[in-house]
Amino acid sequence: MNFIFLDRTCPPRLTFIMENRRRHKPACPRKVSEKKEQLKAFLRQKGFKSTRQRDIIVTEFLKTGEHITAEDLYRKINRKNREIGFTTVYRTLKLLTKSGFATERLFADNLTRYEPLSAEDHHDHLICLGCGSIMEFENLKMERLQKKIADEFGFCIITHKMEFYGYCRECRDKCG
Amino acid sequence: MNFIFLDRTCPPRLTFIMENRRRHKPACPRKVSEKKEQLKAFLRQKGFKSTRQRDIIVTEFLKTGEHITAEDLYRKINRKNREIGFTTVYRTLKLLTKSGFATERLFADNLTRYEPLSAEDHHDHLICLGCGSIMEFENLKMERLQKKIADEFGFCIITHKMEFYGYCRECRDKCG
DNA sequence: AAGGAAAATGAAATTCATTTTCAATTAGAA
DNA sequence: TTCTAATTGAAAATGAATTTCATTTTCCTT
C-alpha cells in the first residue's frame, strides 16, 4: 500500500479526476468513532455483546481502512494485544460483513480481503501486479454502461466485480 | 447451465445483440479436432508426451466448452473412464492453461473454473445467482472505457476481470 | 523389436486459507 | 449478585489446490 492520497484531511472527502472519483480513505478519527457508535448500537439492538476484543479489532480495522486480510489484521493487532486470537479477528470481520459495516472481496491472489463500507460505497479496483497496491475508483459512465449491457441480456444486476490487473504509474516507470 | 444458445451451428460463429457480442459456444466437432491437433503439435514441440488420458481429458474438455471445475470435469470423465484420476485431470487443465489453450477463472464461489480459449478471446461474465448459469459477453465500448479510466490513473492494464452477479431473464421472471 | 531415459500417472499425502468445535470465560439482564 | 446466553481462543476440521513418490508409459535410440 504505497500510493499517495491526494487529500488526507477529512472533508471534503472526494477528489475528482476527470469523471473518475478516487475515493478518500477513512482513518479520520471523527468518522471512526462515529462508525463505532453505529456498530455498538447495532450490536445492542441485535442482542450481541460488546466486548473489549471487538472494540480493539473494530478500531484497528476502521483505522486501517484498507483492503486487508483477516490474517494481516490479526498480525497488526497481535503486536500490541497478544491475547486476541485469530479466530476472534476472523469472526469479527465476518460479523462486520453481515452487519453491513464491511465487505469481503476475493481478488485473484485467492485471499479474502475486508474493507470498511459506508452506505453509498460501490467502487472498482486497480490492482498493481508490481507493488500489490490496490487503488479504487468510481465511474458513473461505467455504471451506466454496465446497466445497459445487463438490460440487453434481460439480466438484473445485484452486484458486480470489476478489477483491472496491471502496473501503476510508479511500477510502470520503474520497469520501463 | 440451462440457457439457450442463439446459434448452435458452426459458422457464422458470433451473434450480435446491439453492440454486445454473445459468444458462440464451441462443441463444433471440426473445431474440437482442429484444436486437438494444435495441442498435439504443441506438446510434441515442447517435448511432452501425448497419452491416452490427455487425449480423453482434452476431448471432453473441449466438447464441454464451458466454465468447468477440475472436479466436475473429472466426474464427467470418470463415469466412462474409471481409471483416469483426478490428479491427471487437474494437471491436464493446468497444462492447457500454461500452453494457452485454456484459462483459469476464479468466480465469487471460490472455485477455479477452466474454459477453452481461442486466440482472440477476451470477454466478461454475467453470473446468475438463481440457476448458476454463466453467460459471456464482449463489449467494445466497455473495453474503450476501461482503457480510458486506467489511462487517467497512469495505470497500464494487463488483464481485467468483470463479473455481474444477479438474475437472468428466466430466474427474474420466475421469482417476480 | 528391445532397451533405456524422461515424462506421465494416480493414490495418497500435504498445504494453506477458511471455518467449526468445544471448553472456559465474560457481558449484561434479572 | 446470580444466571444465562454470547463470546473467546486454541485446536481441530474442512475443502480446494497442489505436491510427492512409486509405478507405468511413451517414444527415442540402438
Image (tube, coloured by chain):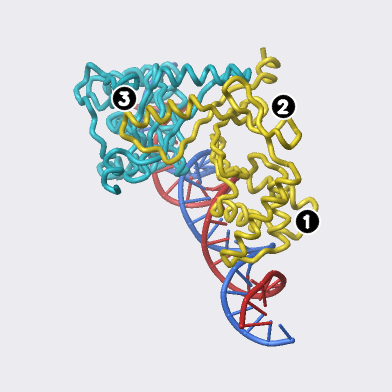
Chain colours: A yellow, B cyan, C red, D blue
Q: Is residue A169 above or below residue A99?
A: above
Spatial CA span between label 1 and label 2: 32 Å
Q: Residue at x 68, y 53 (%)?
A: A36
Spatial CA span between label 3 and label 2: 40 Å
Q: Secondary structure at mark 1?
A: loop
Q: Which residue is mark 3?
A: B22
Whether pointer 3 and pointer 2 mark residues with C-beta atoms closer than 8 Å, the reply is no
Q: Nearer the viewer, mark 3 or mark 2?
A: 2
Q: Residue B148 vs residue B95: left or right?
A: right
User: Percent position (x, y) of residue C13?
Assistant: 53, 51
Q: Secondary structure at mark 2?
A: loop
Q: Residue at x 58, y 28 (%)?
A: A126
Question: Where on the picture, by quarter, is residue B4?
Answer: top left
Q: Chain under label 2?
A: A
Which residue is at the far top? Answer: A176
Q: Which mark is residue A57?
A: none
Spatial CA span between label 1 and label 3: 53 Å
Question: Where on the picture, by quarter, is residue B84?
Answer: top left
User: Percent position (x, y) of residue A31?
Assistant: 70, 46
Figure quadrant of the N terminus of chain A: top right
Viewer-nearest residue: B6 or D13 = B6
Residue B52 shows up from this direction: no
- Local crowd at mark 3 within 10 Å, few (<14), some, or many (≥20)? many
Query: Looking at numbered disc 3 in the image, what kind of residue is underneath it?
Result: Arg
How many dots with numbers? 3
Q: Which residue is mark 2?
A: A6
User: Percent position (x, y) of residue B39?
Assistant: 36, 21
Q: Is there one chain holding both mark 3 and mark 2? A: no
- Local crowd at mark 2 within 10 Å, few (<14), some, or many (≥20)? few
Query: Looking at numbered disc 2 in the image, what kind of residue is underneath it?
Result: Leu
Q: Secondary structure at mark 3?
A: strand
User: Percent position (x, y) of residue B94?
Assistant: 45, 31
